[in-house]
Amino acid sequence: MNSLSYKEALKVDKRTYLEYYCSLLRLKHSIIFTFYTYTDYNIKVVKISLFVFSFSFNYTVNALFFTESAMHKIYKDKGEFDFIYQIPQILYSLVINTVIMIIVKYLSLCESNLLELKKEKEKKRKQKSSKIIKCIIIKNNLYFIISLLFLLFFWYFLSCFCAVYHNTQLFLIKDLLINFALSLITPFFICLLPGIFRIPALRSLKKDNKFLYTISKVAQII
């Protein structure tokens, strides 16, 4: 129901704010989406693969932010972890990881294709089903090939980084764990925003708040 047009949603979507919020959490929270969402149209293996890819990508991005100035700061602080200094690096890597994963999910998950097929009438559905199945197979094959190549690069880069900068491994792991914890916490707050616009748009007496509904659909992409 989250993908319905405004006119369709006015007829069908009678959910409360809490029900809509929970539906977004099932999509946005990586652990809930991967391991506890069973009613979507996505392939479980792909979801697990995305979770592994996201963690690996996050690890690599954190390592990329360890510049000469960051190394010098660690040296000056005699190996003490300065959380305040690391905050910008943690936030940058979190934003980059979020944006990249939105793109990767769009290219790899098949739910949108199957929902498109579900909206079609029965006659057209039969005609389009073979095309959509082929599209899903091609998408998944490309995703697994590309993700495997990236994972090999991540493994090589991180191995070299940790071998050369042996004393920064602890800092890197700390940054990664903080970043990962933030990625698990932020969806609980981000998912509050779309419902603030969507529910009033659907409950308005005049049924003319399409602008608010559009804002909610843009917000739910984040």
Image (spheres, rainbow, N blue to C red):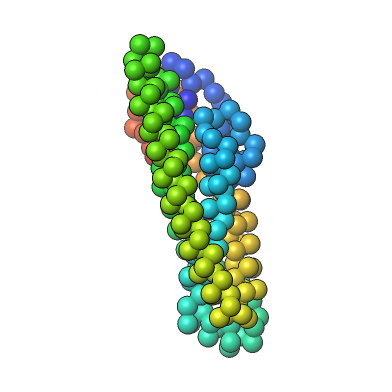
Residue 214, given in percent of the width and then of the height, sits at 36, 34
Of 201 and 191, which appears nearest the observer? 191
The answer to whether residue 53 is visible is yes
In which quadrant of the rendered view does residue 171 lie?
bottom right
Q: Residue at x 41, y 40 (%)?
A: 139
Q: Position of residue 147 (x, y in %)?
A: 47, 52
Q: Is residue 213 visible?
A: no
Q: Residue at x 65, y 81 (%)?
A: 80
Write the residue at 54% across / 69% down.
Answer: 158
Give the vertical position of 58 relative to 184 (above or below). Answer: below
Please indicate whether residue 155 sits to the left or right of residue 177 in the image: left
Is 84 on the left or on the right of 148, as rendered? right
In the rendered image, the quadrant that contains the C terminus is top left
The percent coordinates of residue 169 (x first, y second) are 62, 74
Quadrant of the rendered structure where residue 159 is? Answer: bottom right
Above/below status of 177 relative to 21? below
| Place of residue 4 in the rendered image (x, y in percent of width and height, measured from the top left) | 41, 25
Who's the residue at 34% across and 32% down the image? 211
Identify the residue at the far top of this view.
123
As drawn, 70 above or below 172: below
Between 73 and 52, the one lying in front of the other is 52
Q: How many marks?
A: 0
